[in-house]
Image (cartoon, rainbow, N blue to C red):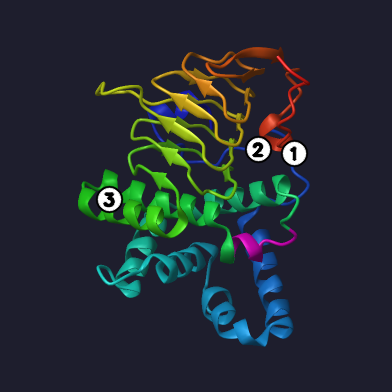
Amino acid sequence: MSLGAILEARSSLPQAPLRTTSRSTSVDAVWAEVRAEAEAALVKEPLYAGIIQATVLDQRSIAQAFAYRLAHRLGDGDLSRLAMRDLCLAAFEADPHAGAHAVRDLVAIRERDPTCRRYLDPFLFYKGLAALEGYRVAHWLWHQGRATLALHVQSRISEVFGADIHPAARIGSGVFIDHATGVVIGETTVIADDVSILQSVTLGGNGKESGDRHPKIERGVLLSVGAKVLGNIRVGEGARVAAAAVVLHDVPAHTTVAGVPARVVSKLPRSEEPAQSMDQFFGDGI
């Protein structure tokens, strides 16, 4: 969805991706493929069969499967796996499009990560996907006025997956958080659909100001390894922020910024989609 739409409210309908993907984004089609991959994995790795059976094949929907998997990984001594599963289910069932958002997140990984050869792998193991879906649970809790539980889920996501996402942040779908380690997303951050975020990215505040103090990331942006975007600034649609850049001012749409502090080093054709291509190369020097 557009940044403006997320600022108003989460859309009731999932947005189409920036470009036509090579894979179906139908919830039923993707869920069927996940189940088929799980059945094949049972044969190839019987030692893991119990987990695959319980996590995928015993579940009736992709939303229920995500709830079960998240509960297994985030449940702890303070909040049991059973209680965590109930929270996750409540969050996903409250949103009739939760399955569609999860599918768009899964498809984003298949489209953009060359190491991903099946849906089952990110579903079971990828920290970025788990952190994102866990955030969605915390976000729902936050807006239900259950701040204590929302912050507990945030804390567990940080401890288990190494990503710190404030539950009040607003994040669209089709978002790819690659590796997740060291990713920090602040309270008033807004991230539109189809954004790619690599490890050690910070979307943070600038100083001790209060109120709306975090970045606004428009649709189709690529935030490369270690990029820091600080303050209530806007990164325009289809822009690319180079690795280790420190961004302190607005970034125009369809440009590449690099350096400390970051500045525009190139303009991108409107047809180029850095979040989809994941291409971090911006030239031989600036």
Q: Which secondary structure, mark 3?
A: helix
Q: Which residue is mark 2?
A: 17
**Three-letter amino acid code at the position of disc 1:** Thr
Occupied quadrant, residue 193? top right
Label 1 or label 3, whichever lies nearer to me, is: 3
Instruction: Determine whether the residue tagged by mark 2 lies in a helix, strand or loop.
Output: loop
Contact? badges 3 and 2 (CB < 8 Å): no
In contact (CB < 8 Å): disc 1 and disc 3: no
Q: Which residues are magenta?
A: 117-123
At numbered mark 1, what does the secondary structure look like: helix, strand or loop? Answer: loop
Quadrant of the image occupied by residue 245: top right
Residue 128 screen position, x and y as percent: 54, 51
Residue 272 visible from this viewpoint: yes
Mark 3 or mark 2, earlier in chain = 2
Quarter-of-image position of residue 184: top left
Q: Which numbered circle lies on residue 20?
A: 1
Q: Which residue is mark 3?
A: 151
